[in-house]
Amino acid sequence: MKDIDSVLKSKKILIVDDESFMRTVLGGIIKHMGFLGVSEARDGKSALEMLRAKPFDICFCDWEMPGMNGLDLFNEIKADEELNHVKFIMVTGNSEAEKVKEAIGSGIKEYIAKPFNEVVIRKKLIKVLSSD
C-alpha cells in the first residue's frame, strides 16, 4: 500500500487494554494519523461483544488483562467466521522471547512491545493494511 491516507477514513479500529492511559495514548496516536473510526474496550470480554455488535477492521490488543486476556481474545476472533477477517496486533509490555514465540505460534502475525511510538504504530498499520 503506497498511500495509507487513502484508507484512513474507512477503517474501523478497536483498542483493547485494561489501562485507560494506554488506550488514550494509543488512540491519540492513531487519531493523529487520521483514523476516524477508533473505539476502545477495557477488556477482552467487552471487546468481543463490541466486535460482534459492529464491524471492525483492526484490533490492537494488550496481552495481559484480567478475565479474557489478549491471546484468548485472538483465539475467539480467529475461531469466529464473522470476525476472523479482523487484523490483530498484539500490544504488550512483555517482550520476552518465550512470549513472542507463543504469540507467533498462536498465529499472531503482528506484535508491538511497549513502549511504542507513532513510527512503530504507522509501520504496523501499513503492514496489516497492505495484507488486504
Image (cartoon, helix red, strand yellow):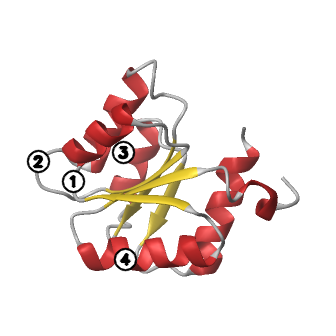
Q: Which comes sooner in the sequence, label 2 or label 4?
A: 4
Query: Mark 1 packing: few (<14 Cα in 10 Å), some, or many (20+)?
Result: many
| Cα–Cα gap, marks 1 and 4 | 14 Å
Q: Which comes sooner in the sequence, label 1 or label 4?
A: 4
User: Contact, CB < 8 Å: mark 1 with mark 2?
Assistant: yes
Residue 43, percent across and down? 21, 53
- Residue denoted by label 1: 43
Tell me the amino acid under the disc marked 4.
Thr
In front: label 4 or label 3: 4
- Residue denoted by label 2: 67
- Residue denoted by label 3: 102
Element at label 4? helix
Residue 121, percent across and down? 58, 69
Q: Residue furthest right?
A: 2
| Cα–Cα gap, marks 4 and 3 | 27 Å
Tell me the amino acid under the disc marked 3.
Glu
User: Contact, CB < 8 Å: mark 4 with mark 3?
Assistant: no
Residue 132, percent across and down? 72, 38
